[in-house]
Image (spheres, helix red, strand yellow):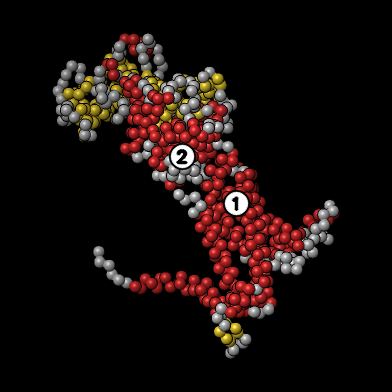
Amino acid sequence: MNKVPNNKAWWLVLPVFLLVAFSAVVPMMTVVNYSVQDIFDQSSRYFVGADWYRQVLQDPRLHDSLLRQFIYSGCVLLIEIPLGIAIALTMPTKGRWSSACLIVMAIPLLIPWNVVGTIWQIFGRADIGLLGASLNQLGINYNYAANTMDAWVTVLVMDVWHWTSLVALLCYSGLRAIPDVYYQAARIDRASAWAVFRHIQLPKMKNVLLIAVMLRFMDSFMIYTEPFVLTGGGPGNATTFLSQTLTQMAVGQFDLGPAAAFSLVYFLIILLVSWLFYTAMTHADKD
Amino acid sequence: MAGIRLQHLAHSYSRTPVGADDYALRELDHVWAQGGAYALLGPSGCGKSTLLNIISGLLSPSQGQVLFDGKEVNALSPQARNIAQVFQFPVVYDTMTVFDNLAFPLRNQGLDEAQVRRKVEEIADVLELGAALKKKARNLSADEKQKVSMGRGLVRDDVSAILFDEPLTVIDPHLKWKLRRKLKQIHEQFNITMIYVTHDQLEASTFADKIAVMYGGQIVQFGTPRELFERPRHTFVGYFIGSPGMNLIEVQPQPGGVGFASVHLPLPADLQARLASTPAARLQVGIRPEFVQVREAAFDDAFRARVVDVEDLGTYRILTLDLEGVALKVRLGEDRVVPVEDAWISFPAQWLMLYADDVLLEAAP
């Protein structure tokens, strides 16, 4: 067969190329553009090279919120992943109850972020909130607006309430995909419940867990709306996470140059950590 | 090690079984003697795996008892019954090495590490897995995985019995034969009761001393491969075993015997008496294609049949004949002359079986 060279097919790639260009490349390039210039108005702009990067990397305010951000995301993963697995393991597998459970589990996932923030803001209020007022009635001094620890716990519990379902549902689907014969073989081999979990369930859940860890890491690392609505970043700066700091910088102070430089650093951190998770989990037990 | 006895055993997957069709296993009584090598042979969906899972304790029967050495074990778990079972598709613990996979049942039993090592190496040697012991089980081929699966079943030598549920389905043909030989060797060496489920008659007869043929949730015959071939006790056994299966012809009772169209087949007097006292809706005679006598010319009391088709299968030929509108298969050795157009055939009395409602009719002993 003769091959007829026909490069017109390249046109078919054009729509995707344009889509990616406008949705990702062009906006990102604008950010890159801002990050290397100092812009005063439309006619006066100065190229500053890596100055903004140097400045943001040495900014103690950013160091603090980066640290807070890592602690927060770490806590989220440490609580939600084991809890999600535990819930998935205890969920009924057959019958009407399993459908009921699935629906109940899915409800928090359907609530918009700012609504979640508002729900917890009212729920936790020390004067009128069901949770806050009850705790104070019991003699526990709880006030998320005033105590750093209370604010942190509330922000974490809110995220656990909102997103553990996602982990649980992913794990549940992973567990359902394990053929019965594995459990039968384990019974024949006298495997303990722990061995069944360690050597059958966990390895078979690995792929969904990878997705769960990545999603929860990325989402929690970029969290903005819920803590902003709940605590506004306070008390003080106690719950001011990275994206809120960034917003203050870009929109509040209109420091577009440093904010752009910081955005790119932020993006690279997420990319790097996600890559680390991915590599660690996919290469964990190769020969 | 134990002899296994099934008493009035039946099982239904439906919670409220109504008719016989609701039962995956119809009531049966059966004994597997200690140390025997048995095969459970039957088509897909006949209840083989159900029966196996009831013996191992993975499934609890709806009625009847399972007895190990005379002791009822219905309420005991597979662990307590101390049974090993190998499944149709390989089950390996992905994250463990081959060594750890094979050692797993032993370690769960609480054996010390020196004993574990000795047993695992012994079994790895038998199954030729020695070179793969340090590999992660997930990186094995399907063949090797199934060998590991089998190894986990064979590694404990104190078990009551080892059950195999079509273990060689995923194995390459040339390896199948080898593994079957291995199993037989292991059986001879350790004297463990082994029950081997398969739908392949060749596999059953090379592995087992005695074969139980299952059909429609019942064991229709239990005997040596030779007995199953020569005296099938049920038309299904005749049809399922042998290649091609037994010729089965519907007949009517006639004075002095049975017959169809203008063909008359005489029966011995005692069988005639038995037939007369047996009410049957359906009467068939059966004869193996190997046992039909064929010549090119008329002889004795031979019937004349038309040759419809000849299939050459290398070492033998299969003739399809038409005898008064009834199709018959006949198997001829390659050295025999093949009749053209017409063939004269007869049915030796010793190989002619009579079936009343699918069950072999025999003269009272």
Determine which residue is flagged by label 2. Answer: B99
Q: Where's residue B102, x and y in %? A: 47, 37
Discs 1 and 2 lie in a common subunit: no
- Name the kind of residue labelled 2 in the image: Phe
* Left/right of residue B129 with respect to residue A260 in the rendered view: left
* Left/right of residue B182 with respect to residue B13 in the rendered view: left
Tell me whether the residue at label 1 lies in contact with that at label 2, contact meaning CB atoms closer than 8 angstroms: no
Q: How many numbered marks, from 0 up?
A: 2
**Quadrant where the N terminus of chain A is found in the figure:** bottom left
In the rendered view, tell whether residue B349 sits above or below residue B61: above
- Residue B211 visible to an observer of this rendering: no
In the rendered view, tell whether residue B365 sits above or below residue B62: above
Q: Where's residue A10, x and y in %? A: 38, 72
Q: Secondary structure at mark 1?
A: helix
Specify the quadrant of the image occupied by residue B79: top right
Taking depth in this image into account, of B234 and A257 the one nearest to the observer is A257
Q: Residue at x 56, y 62 (%)?
A: A273
Specify the quadrant of the image occupied by residue B358: top left
Which chain contains the residue that carries disc 2?
B
* Left/right of residue A21 with respect to residue B283 in the rendered view: right
- Residue B104 visible to an observer of this rendering: yes
Determine which residue is flagged by label 1. Answer: A169
Q: CA distance from mark 1 to mark 2?
A: 34 Å
Taking depth in this image into account, of B210 and B63 the one nearest to the observer is B210
Q: Residue at x 64, y 79 (%)?
A: A255
- Name the kind of residue labelled 1 in the image: Leu
In front: label 1 or label 2: 2
Q: Where's residue B298, x and y in %? A: 16, 21
